[in-house]
Amino acid sequence: MELVCYCPWKESPEESFLNEEDRFIQEDAQEDPEKEHRYSLRRLEMFWKVYKRKYDAKEIAPVGSDWLHDSQYSYTMFLVTSHNSDVQM
């Protein structure tokens, strides 16, 4: 989801982020039985590989970007929610 929200893409996220081989596998119903569903495990794994590649290249949430700010905010809210749950117990 972060790739689609914060990285520019053209016609579709698949065309912009996945290579030709991955797109072919994704289109083959025998390779991906969940192809018609909104959340296909194979599709998510393909995008995870792209995300990991960009992460290793330090292209994910660069310093000073809205992406980094939003990630920090989300993580802070996660910690606050966890803390509030502990306090309530």
Image (cartoon, rainbow, N blue to C red):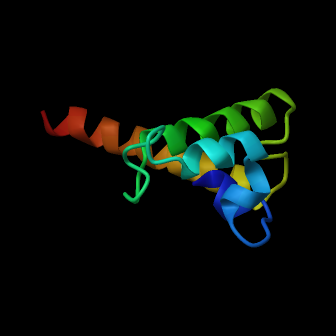
Name the residue at the left extreme: 89
Name the residue at the bottom extreme: 11
* Residue at 74% across, 72% down: 11
Question: Closest to the observer: 24 or 59?
Answer: 24
Query: Which quadrant of the figure has residue 56?
Result: top right
Task: Using the rendered image of the protein, determine whether residue 19 is visible from the camera's viewpoint.
Answer: no
Q: Left or right of 63: which side holds 87?
A: left
Q: How many marks?
A: 0
Classify 57 as above or below 80: above
The image shows residue 66 at horizontal and vertical percentages of: 74, 60
The image shows residue 60 at horizontal and vertical percentages of: 77, 42
The image shows residue 22 at horizontal and vertical percentages of: 67, 41
Q: Left or right of 10: which side holds 79?
A: left
Query: Which quadrant of the figure has residue 85?
Result: top left
* Residue at 49% across, 38% down: 42
Classify 37 as above or below 32: below
The image shows residue 41 at horizontal and vertical percentages of: 43, 40
Classify 40 as above or below 89: below
Task: Using the rendered image of the protein, determine whether residue 59 is visible from the camera's viewpoint.
Answer: yes
* Residue at 40% across, 59% down: 36
Quarter holding the N terminus? Answer: bottom right
Quarter holding the C terminus? Answer: top left
Question: Closest to the observer: 58 or 88?
Answer: 58
Name the residue at the top extreme: 56
* Residue at 77% across, 31% down: 53
Q: Left or right of 53: which side holds 36?
A: left
